[in-house]
Image: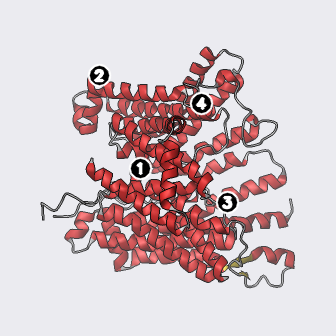
Amino acid sequence: MVRYGVMIVFAFLLFGIILLIAGNDPIQSYRDLFGSTLGSAYGLSEVFVAMTPMLLTALAVALPSRIGLINVGVEGQLYLGAGLATWGALAFGDLPAWLLLPWMILLGMIGGGLWALIPGILRAMGLVNETITTLLLNSVAPLIVSFLVFGFWHSPVDTNKTPNFPPAARLPTLFDTRIDLSLVIGLLLLAVFWLAMKYSRWGLEMRAIGGNPQAALRNGIPLKTYLISVMCLGGAIGGLAGMAQVSGFYGVLLANFSRGIGYMGFLISWLAGGNPLGIVLTSFGVAIITSGGSLLQITRDVPYAVINILLAFTLFVVLARPQLLGRRKAA
Amino acid sequence: MTLLAVLGVLSSAIYSGTSLLYTTLGEIIDQRSGIVNLGLEGVLLVSASAGFALTAITGNPYLGVAVSMLIGGVMNLSLGYLTVTRRANQLASGLSLMFFGFGLSALIGRPYVGARIVGLPRLPLPGLSNLPVLYSSLFRFDLLIYLAIPAAVLVWWLLFRTRWGLGLRAVGESADIAFASGRDPRLIRYQALFVGGLFAGLGAAHLSIAYAMNWTEYMTAGRGFIAVALVIFSKWHPLRAIAGALLFSAAVAFQLLLQSSGTQISPFLLSTIPYLVTILVLMLWGGTRRHSAPASLGRVYLGTE
């Protein structure tokens, strides 16, 4: 734990130097960053808002990873889920919220699940590695959403987004903040994931497959069924993340709304080792950085994207695992 | 539709395909040595912004191209540090590098948004000088376009006809066996990443200095991932990468043609075709068990300690 702390301080130092070179006062910038996020109830609520999609996209990676599937395709699953959920919002906008929202959630999960079905089947048949297919499909999904938005769904005013969703199609927000119900859904799903992996038969069988697929197969575990269904379930959660983004956060479908939330999920799940509690903590940390970035953009006049440098430095030092304290004993 | 329109579309397809080809060649070199570089998008962005900035400052596009290449190499070396020396997961390291590129390029490029530069000079195709100006002006290409196909041949020669290339491919197939036969997998992977980065940098330079001649945040718009797809499509072979780059840019050209002829087919759907073709081709290969991916692609070399 101490080592992680030291590493992250190191990342912040590096980014401070970059800020200094770019002509900003690093100390003041960091005070802004933390003051704006952890310093007030509103700031903290914004951190939770930023964290919400990460919980879901990380779970979409963590679940398949338990049986050795590498799902790099959450970005695509997110888009398709958002697309199908939007269709629900536009076509069935007259329904009451208690009927419309579950229907949209179902549609979002179907969208993401179907998108993951292709890599799942190809992998189970032994034709193509799922890493490759999910990556390729990532590039296809935003194009399909763009096709739908520009071609059919766009509002009379803008060509690149749909009209605003009716109130019934919006996920309810909590405590007068922008936090919406999908945060609760994400945390619940992570808890279910933890319980299922630990106590259910499926969890046991999945752990067996993750340990040794051949041995699992010989013990009568239906390997192919697991490969396909777990991949689809991961995709469905990715699709749910997309639904939550359009229904909860934006309230509208923008043609290119995500620039890497799905990939971020992959990183978070990987850093957390697929562990549910780790996912919550890592998402929280990443969310502090990304939501602090928007304030930095306003007060420090640096492009919003610059906060990605701090994020990447943090990831780099964690990935590089510098041996600051250990190792010396071995020498 | 006039001949002029068709030629114009062809010309713009060549422009958009060139940077893809260079980038794909770079990624082929990386992956042949066993490293998946998912950070390509970030590498391209930083290279393109740095090259553009330097061109804007010095007014010399060749200097800009050189810096782009160098930055591409250095960015790739940082991936090498994580994946080779620190033995970190390649996919996660690559994605981190991508986010790093988003940020750094925005910072580098911000003062130069809207800046005007003198791009790479465009030279007419020899033999076309007696055509009417209207036509010959479409076929004035910069040096990097003329060098694109020779570059693919060069990479093929490097990988398949030199001892260095043999060692590189050996490491990509099995780092342990390469080590046992007296090669240093770590050094070779660093070299592969650096050379691959030089080519990626060329692709980025062509995009910002020769083709678009401006800088906008996130201007690569997914080209890094297209190149990764192209590597798979071309079965990790530099000469097939030419065909791959042609397919992708033909899809772009076809869209422009259809738009100019007023046909109602969505350009977005057309853009999906190359990816779908790639997946189909992979399925067919998968069925015949003729895999040609480097066998230790993506694996961490733990060394022998």
* B288 relative to A41 in the view: left or right: left
Residue under pointer 3: B250
How many numbered circles does the render carry? 4
Query: For the residue marked with disc 2, what is the amino acid?
Result: Ser
Residue A106 visible in the snapshot: yes
Q: Residue at x 58, y 49 (%)?
A: A295
Residue under pointer 2: A200
Residue A157, compared with residue B258, is above or below; it is above
What label does residue A248 carry, if any?
Answer: 4
Query: For the residue marked with disc 4, what is the amino acid?
Result: Gly
- Which quadrant of the structure image shows residue B12? bottom right
Camera-nearest residue between A149 and B155: A149
What label does residue B288 carry, if any?
Answer: 1
Structural crowding at the residue carrying mark 4, measured as other residues with C-alpha within 10 Å and reported as few (<14), some (14–19) or many (≥20): many
Q: Are marks 4 and 1 on the same chain?
A: no
Q: CA distance from mark 1 to mark 2?
A: 39 Å
Looking at the rendered image, the quarter that the C terminus of chain A falls into is: bottom left
Element under disc 2: loop
Residue A63, given in percent of the width and then of the height, sits at: 38, 34
Q: Are marks 1 and 2 on the same chain?
A: no
Q: Earlier in the sequence, mark 4 or mark 2?
A: 2
Residues marked 3 and 4 touching at CB (< 8 Å): no
Query: For the residue marked with disc 1, what is the amino acid?
Result: Thr
Q: CA distance from mark 4 to mark 2?
A: 31 Å
Q: Are marks 2 and 3 on the same chain?
A: no
State which chain disc 2 sits on: A
Residue B265, compared with residue A187, is above or below; it is below
Residue B297, compared with residue B180, is above or below; it is above
Element under disc 1: helix
Residues marked 4 and 2 touching at CB (< 8 Å): no
Residue A114 visible in the snapshot: no
- Give the number of the mark in front: 4 or 2: 4
